[in-house]
Image (cartoon, rainbow, N blue to C red):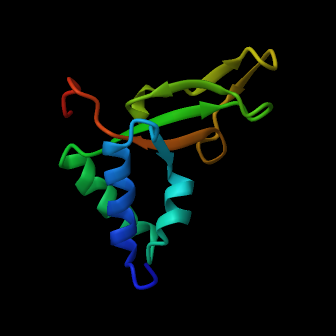
Amino acid sequence: MPNESWIDRFDKVVRRLNRDPGYREIALRRLLADVGPPSEYDLAAAIFERIQNGDLEAHYRVRSPETGAGLGEYADILEVPLEVRDPTSNLTFRLEPQRDIEVIYRRREAGHLRP
């Protein structure tokens, strides 16, 4: 729809995550691009509300700076280690969050408890 608001686009993504079994997750970067919020703050507030309502879960995927391979995924940002061994490049590196951590969102799985 040409007059669709950013929050309508966001709601559509959340509905798709919760209804379409083939649509498992969306990365924050992709969500920003697809939804086009007026600011990152506005999108963060909408995401927070959906997490509180039980519609979404945030996950933190560690990626290799050398190869881009996924090296681990964590449900809590505090679980992400400071250093990671990358078996694809045989290197151990100190994480740089902006470069090495990808925030992704998924539907809340059955049986998962809210923190």
x, y (%) of residue 29?
A: 56, 55
Q: Is residue 1 left or right of residue 100?
A: left
Residue located 26% across and 47% down the image? 51
Q: Is residue 62 above or below residue 34?
A: above
Q: Quadrant of residue 100?
A: top right
Residue located 67% across and 30% down the image? 94
Q: Is residue 100 left or right of residue 46?
A: right
x, y (%) of residue 9?
A: 39, 67
Q: Is residue 90 above or below residue 82?
A: above
x, y (%) of residue 57?
A: 33, 39
Q: Is residue 47 above or below residue 109?
A: below
Residue located 39% across and 36% down the image? 21
Q: Indicate the quadrant containing the N terminus: top left, top right, bottom left or bottom right.
A: bottom left
- Which one is nearer the viewer's eye here, 64 or 25? 25
x, y (%) of residue 22?
A: 46, 37
The total number of labels drawn is 0
**Quick one: which residue is furthest to the bottom in this view?**
3
Q: Indicate the quadrant containing the C terminus: top left, top right, bottom left or bottom right.
A: top left
Residue located 56% across and 42% down the image? 102
- Which one is nearer the viewer's eye here, 84 or 46? 46
